[in-house]
Amino acid sequence: MAAREYDLEIAAIDATLVSIEKVLDLPKLRASAIELEAAAGVPDLWDDPENAQKVTSRLSRVQSTISRLEGLRRRVEDMPILLELANAEGDEAALADAGTELDSVKKAIGELEVQTLLNGEYDERDALVTIRSEAGGVEAADWAEMLMRMYLRYCERHNLKVDVLETSYAEEAGIKSTTFRVSSPYAYGTLSVEQGTHRLVRISPFDSQSRRHTSFAGVEIVPVVEQSDAIEIDEKEIRVDVYRSSGPGGQGVNTTDSAVRLTHIPTGIVVSCQNERSQIQNKATAMAVLQSKLLERRRQEEQAKINALKGDNSGSWGNQMRSYVLAPYQMVKDLRTDYETGNTSAVLNGEIDEFIEAGIRWRRSS
């Protein structure tokens, strides 16, 4: 095997990091951090809880980005020193360690480079993820639950905070739908490329003749609304239904009618929430979810108008976006980016980073 040209690799990642520092504007980030620290230190900050949350959240994100950039810069600058020491001592083990560190830095810079592509209006926000079973009956319901597990495992691997707002279980197996919030910087921008129809092909565990079945589940990703979004909702346009929260198999988990379902009559959008303890709390959470969905609807309508002016007649990439085949062979393939892998078990256990990165780069180049 040819010897690695460490100097060339270091020069390449250094150039990439310089480019990232320019795009993210490190001096501006530092100035912003100083301003936000001052705003967060105002004695009466929490007199306005919503504004306080916005300030502290923004400060946390800016500080996190600065820390990440500065940490990577130190690691890149340390690389030549590590290699020089390893070569001077003729220590093969030390040289191997330096190579491992170089690979680790390269991967971290690649991930940060992808984040610089997330510059949409709402990309920095938290995400609301909704998964629904589609065509395929009990197979589709089971598939929807498998997808829910896949995304929850992905969030767990990345230490992302998740709040499950509502889950509607199917009678025989799986789920009809679920909605959960992912709280993390750039959660929406990162996960938005997962939106669309996911197709599963496998030998059905519910078929006594062990035949191969195809089932579908839809994934919807919307950004969480903020106070400044000003989504006005007329109470007269909302139908409110209350019911008892339930768990798998229809088992009641609450003895009162605390779960809330909101139907926005003009658009037909339906949202539910059952994770809070009171009906009032569930209604407030459901209203926030409804606002997010209406915001995303408005964004899509505006984008459709822009595309019409551009003469963009291409179909939506969100539909039929990924295929998961478990039989007769093993493969997961993204139909937009053509990225694929034969390690289906890893993907279904939440290892979808490469698919997300490929999706973000594909979207930017489209």
Image: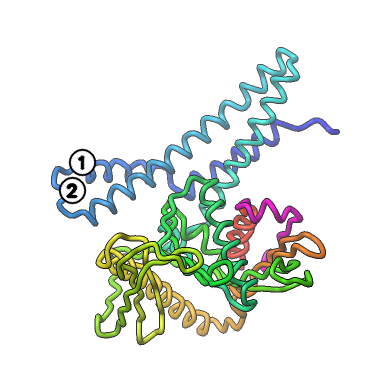
Asked whether residue 129 is in view, the answer is yes
Asked whether residue 211 is in view, the answer is no
What colour scheme governs how the chains and residues are painted in the rendered image of this protein?
Answer: rainbow
Residue at image mark 1:
41
Q: Residue at x 71, y 66 (%)?
A: 205
Q: Residue at x 36, y 80 (%)?
A: 263
Question: Is 330 on the left or on the right of 168, as rendered?
Answer: right
Taking the magenta stretch, the answer to whether it contains residue 177 is no
Is there CB contact under 8 Å for labels 2 and 1?
Answer: yes
Residue 334 spot, x, y in % from top left:
68, 64
Residue 3 spot, x, y in % from top left:
81, 30
Q: Residue at x 60, y 46 (%)?
A: 110
**Quarter of the N terminus within the rendering:** top right
The disc at residue 45 is 2
Which residue is outermost to the bottom? 266
Q: In the image, which residues are magenta?
A: 336-351
